[in-house]
Image (cartoon, helix red, strand yellow):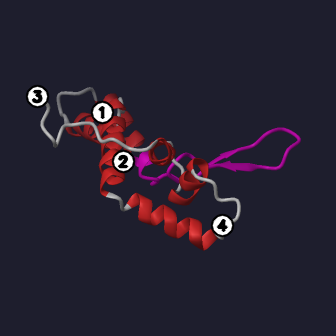
Amino acid sequence: MVSKSKAKVKLTAKQEKFCQGIANGLSQSDAYRSAYSTKNKKKKSVWENASHLADNVKVKSRLKELKDNLAKKQLWTREQSVVILGDIAKDFDERSSDQISATKELNAMYGYNEPTKIEFNNFPPMVIKRHGD
C-alpha cells in the first residue's frame, strides 16, 4: 500500500502543463500562458492567476517533486567542482603543477582573473568574458 505522502499527486492536464513549464524554466506567468487561455486577460490577471495556482497545495507538491527529480539528474554541480578543486589545491601529496592548475581554475570560477584580451589581425581588440565574470 502506498502512503499518502508518497502517492502521486493528481493534477488536471492544465495544472500539469503549468508545472512542466515552470520545471523547464518558464516564469509562473509564462507557464500559466502556456497552459491556459489568456487571450482576453491583462498581464496583472495572468500574474495573479499564476501566483494563486503556484500556491495551490497539489501544484506546490508537484513542483517540489519535479525540482527534486531534476536535482537527482544533475551529474555535476558547481559546488562539487569547488570541493574537488579545493581538495587538490590543498593536498600537499599532489604534484605542484596540479595544485597550481586547481587554484587557477578556482580563481577563474570565482571571477578573480582579469578578462582575457584576444586580438585578431585586422579587427579591433575584443574582451572575452568567461562564465561567471
Left or right: 70 with respect to 1?
A: right
Residue indicated by mark 1 = 72
Q: Residue at x 70, y 65 (%)?
A: 40
User: What is the CA distance from the residue labelled 1 to the residue labelled 4?
Assistant: 37 Å
Residue indicated by mark 3 = 1
Q: Secondary structure at mark 2?
A: helix
Of circles 2 and 1, the one toward us is 2
Residue indicated by mark 2 = 63
Residue indicated by mark 4 = 41
Mark 1 or 3 closer to N-term? 3
In x, y percent, where is residue 97? 34, 29
Q: Main secondary structure of the magenta part?
A: loop
Q: Residue at x 49, y 48 (%)?
A: 18
Mark 1 or 4 closer to N-term? 4
Question: Which residues are drawn in magenta?
Answer: 107-133
Mark 3 or 4 closer to N-term? 3
Mark 2 or 3 closer to N-term? 3
Q: Residue at x 15, y 41 (%)?
A: 4
Residue 81, quarter of the rendered image = top left
Q: Amino acid at mark 3?
A: Met
From what the image shows, is residue 33 above or below residue 78?
below
- On whether residue 91 falls in the magenta region, the answer is no
Of circles 1 and 4, the one toward us is 4
User: What is the CA distance from the residue labelled 2 to the residue labelled 1?
Assistant: 14 Å
